[in-house]
Image (spheres, rainbow, N blue to C red):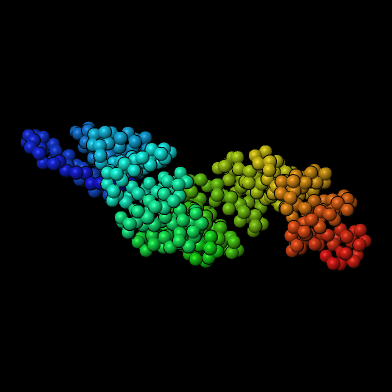
Amino acid sequence: MTKKRAQKHNGSRVSPEAAGDIQEADRLLASAFEYHRAGSLDKAKELYRKTLLRFPDHPDALHLLGVIHYQQGDTESALRHITRAITLKPGTPEYSCNLGNVLRDRGDIEGAISCYREAIALKPDLAEAYNNLGACLRRSSRMQEAIECYQKALQIKPGYAAAYNNLGNILRETGDIDKAIENYRQALCVNPQYAEACFNLGNALCDKYDLEAAAACFRKAVTINPGYSEAYLCLGRLLRSSGNMQEAMECCRRALETAKDPGDAYHLLGRLFHETRDYQKACESFQKELEARPGCAEAYNCLGMSLHHAGKPEDAISSYLKALDIDPESAETLNNLGIAFHDTGRPEEAICSYKKAIAIDPRYAQAHNNLGNVLHSIHRMHEAIDSLRQAILIRPDFAEAHNNLGLALLTEKRYEEALSC
């Protein structure tokens, strides 16, 4: 947000009484601005309002009060105050730039773009306007224009950490990971305490499979900002992939302390509990995820898996069916439903589920393998062998399918073929 110190009165001849009022307004605004710059928003707001009680049409006070409303998430009040300031004092680039920020956050991207372009026309060296314009162009998928805006912002203001970070983001999105990493590192050279740049660098390093360096970035991000829930989750995922389950769980718990949407943290925590065979806690985590995301098919699928492993296959079936009501094209859920049907003695329903999964994803080797197993169990041996061979054709290194094919061939007394499996 662009904050410009309120301008003092221009000193034209006024009456002693009016001069005293102007001096009082200048004093109040200067004091408010200092509080504002120091982050004491409520105190600054009080002083801006005090100024406006005496001078209702003071454009700087209206503008800066609008900025505080924006910073506190009240975009409607921000829009009203900044628009009024522009009406009273048109042609002020900082006003237009900040109005653009408000419109952007209210979803009016084209309106925001117009405001930023107006600010640039009024003040061609306003780096913040180029940076913010780049962000809106990126959201409009006008990537090359956005890149050029960020580059212009950096040309004007070479030590602009946010522009380096934003340029890194768009380069990563367009597939230039190496240049993205360079820009994140430039942002951190300018501001080593820039938590968002640490986080973004970590994600870019994950793209390059430099997982140790990525983990170090996520750790630095949460050290700088202990409430950075997204960074805790990314670190948790890396720790899970390296088998450090307990520390990954702790990352999930830390993320839950500040996450606005706890769904991702509960999902990861549920998977961690499932993989460490604490199925009851896994079920509890997925149920909490569903409280946060009532229509999440993946959460119902994962809950079904944990319920099945907890010895509750009928409850698992119910959960899988809820998942399929939401996403009937999930081959994974259909495969899991087939397993539950098979384990509860309902082979025909299992066969139906596996075949539906295969129709959706013909190269789903696990579903072919499971279909082969259930066909074997009801002595439909030729079909079973065909399904198991198909699983191996898709995944030649599928050890479980090789073993199951060997068992099926033994049942058919095809000993030499079985030995070759």
Q: Nearer the viewer, residue 413 or 390?
A: 390
Q: From what the image shows, is residue 189 above or below residue 82?
A: below
- Indicate the quadrant where residue 51 lies: top left
- Indicate the quadrant where residue 73 lies: top left
Q: Is residue 128 left or right of residue 270?
A: left
- Residue 137: percent from the left, percent from the top? 42, 46
Q: Which quarter of the rendered picture does the C terminus lie within? A: bottom right
Q: Is residue 199 left or right of residue 25?
A: right
- Residue 292: percent from the left, percent from the top? 55, 42
Residue drawn where x is 27% and y is 36% of the image: 86
- Indicate the quadrant where residue 385 lies: bottom right
Q: Is residue 48 visible in this depiction of the protein?
A: no
Q: From what the image shows, is residue 333 above or below residue 221?
A: above
Q: Is residue 315 left or right of residue 8?
A: right
Residue drawn where x is 84% and y is 54% of the image: 386
Tally the numbered discs.
0
Q: Residue furthest right?
A: 413
Q: Nearer the viewer, residue 143 or 294?
A: 143
Q: Is residue 55 left or right of residue 306?
A: left
Q: From what the image shows, is residue 84 above or below residue 200?
A: above
Q: Is residue 309 visible in this depiction of the protein?
A: yes
- Residue 315: percent from the left, percent from the top? 71, 43
Q: Nearer the viewer, residue 86 or 192?
A: 86
Residue drawn where x is 78% and y is 59% of the image: 392
Residue drawn where x is 38% and y is 42% of the image: 113
